Amino acid sequence: MTRDETDQTIKIAYYPGCTLKGTTKEFGDSIELSFSALGIELIEIPSWICCGATSAHATDKNLAIALPYHNFAKTQEMGMGTIAIPCAACFQRHKVTNKECEREDIRKEMYKITGHRYDGNIRCRHPLEVLMKDIKPEKWQNLLKKKLGLKAACYYGCLLTRPEDVMEFDERPENPQLMDDFCETLGMKTVDWNYKVTCCGASYFASKPEIVLKLTSKILEDAKKSGAECVVVACPLCHSNLDMKQKEIGKELRMDLDMPVFYFSQLLGLALGIDHRKLGLHTHFVDTQVLLDRKRLI
Amino acid sequence: MEKVLGKNRKSEIKEIEGFIDGLDVSGCYQCGKCTAGCPVAHLMDNPPQRMIRLVQIGAIDEALSSNAYWNCVACGTCSARCPRKVKISELMDGLKSFSIKKKMTPKDRSERNIALFNEIFLNNIRRHGRLFEVELVGMNNVLSGHLLRDTTKAPEMLVHGKLKFIPSNIAKKDMKKIFKNTVEKNDKR
Ligand code: SF4
Ligand code: SF4
């Protein structure tokens, strides 16, 4: 992270990842808009490539490291010291790679494979970490325009916290609080519930949907029972599963779930007074407008 | 460790362990915590605890012919909770890439779909640099025989400008090089 002395903006390299530019555009848009409202400039890595996701690391270990390595090398070329990665899946692949790149032999091997140099010195941060650990709420809280009186279940899923020694996301990997603290900063209440870090089966979204349906229904049922009005996520795969499949799940559970699923960044945008349409809140499968209307947030 | 291994299997265990840095199955004392926390244990013929045991005793063929590692969703819960720090999730991944390299196809159709999806996904990013989502869903459905899966959601996504019909096609040379020096290199061996 570099702070420009003259204009006080903070500059961070930015890796949006494939889905934030496509099917989960609302995640990318809301990150970019709210960070710019906070005076944090996200500079997109010019020729970033796909991190390879689960498919790469299930297939070939070197491939799984080489793809994120390319992005670190490109960031190094930009002369930047920190990358922010909002998608939990991309974030995890990059963190794992960065850990591997602490070893010189692996960096040498990767140089041979990719032809690019990376010295292993770039910090890889999730935007929640940037806001809560690096800049700290005291520095940006005063920019918030609305208090969001929502009651939420914060869903971390598997990728933000595991493996814990690599991710170092939260000291309490089985019951993380970082996203809860973030939501409370925005004026929300969060519930204690059981499925915070339970897998939703994301990687099998397309290939084995019956697994996904089963795992996701348990998560939504528990969130509902714990008294939450909505679920907050940091992962486009979790979002697709919880939002897009919710109607189907509700039918199977014979339950009126009606749980809007928000990206943490959409909530930040709302609290900053950004127009809800720009944050893509009208593009979800589960309606968000009724709840936000009732709370007088739009 | 050596005592419990069948003689002829040692080299294969080495090979599998070679895929996974720091994997040492000998530490497992069969407490079952990994299986208890696994979200898909009920779908596995050999849940995580038993997979570790199979590798421990050198029953590699049984381990490789199991559907466990295909069903594993790589959530990492098992490794995170193991009191002996056995890298179970990493073993599952290792078995997957091992069997891909040996061109072993899973028996069950739904498991073949997982293998197929990975192949289609990687082929997609190799050619486009970034994932071309429309093509991914289309190809996967055609090849796995589920023509309409997830396409029912397409109209809404289209309205919101979420479906892009033009691929990124970025860093083509870099991608070509990376694939040539990793996956394709293994193919030639
Ligand atoms: S949790 Fe660890 S020690 Fe217990 S059975 Fe599983 S691998 Fe073995
Ligand atoms: S990583 Fe795989 S084996 Fe381990 S708990 Fe998750 S699904 Fe089960």
Image (cartoon, rainbow, N blue to C red):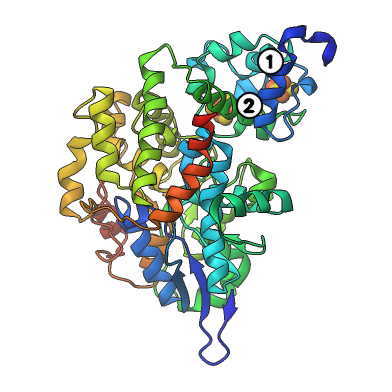
Mark 1, other Cα within 10 Å: few <14 / some 14–19 / many ≥20: many
Determine the residue positioned at 82% across, 16% down. Answer: B1
Q: How far apart are labels 1 and 2 at the CA level?
A: 10 Å
Q: Is residue B145 above or below residue A6?
A: above
Task: Give the x, y percent position of residue A210.
Answer: 35, 23
Among numbered discs 1 and 2, the one appearing first in the sequence: 1
| Quarter of the image where ligand 2 sits | top right
Horizontal side, residue A35 vs residue A273: left or right: right
Quadrant showing the C terminus of chain A: bottom left
Q: Amino acid at mark 2?
A: Leu
* Chain to which mark 1 belongs: B
The answer to whether B51 is drawn above or below residue A202 in the figure is above
Tag 2 subunit:
B
> Which residue occupies the foreground of this view, A290 or A59?
A59
Q: Name the residue tied to disc 2.
A: B91
The quarter of the displayed image where residue B8 is located: top right
Q: Residue B3 versus residue A39: which sits nearer the camera?
A: B3
Q: What amino acid does circle 1 point to?
A: Val
The numbered dot on residue A66 is none
Spot occupied by residue A156 in the image (x, y as percentages of width and height): 52, 45
- Residue A49 position in % (x across, y down): 43, 55
User: Residue B137 appears in which quarter of the rendering?
Assistant: top left
**Tag 1 near tag 2, CB within 8 Å:** yes
> Which residue lies under the disc numbered 1?
B55
B61 w.r.t. B155: above or below: above
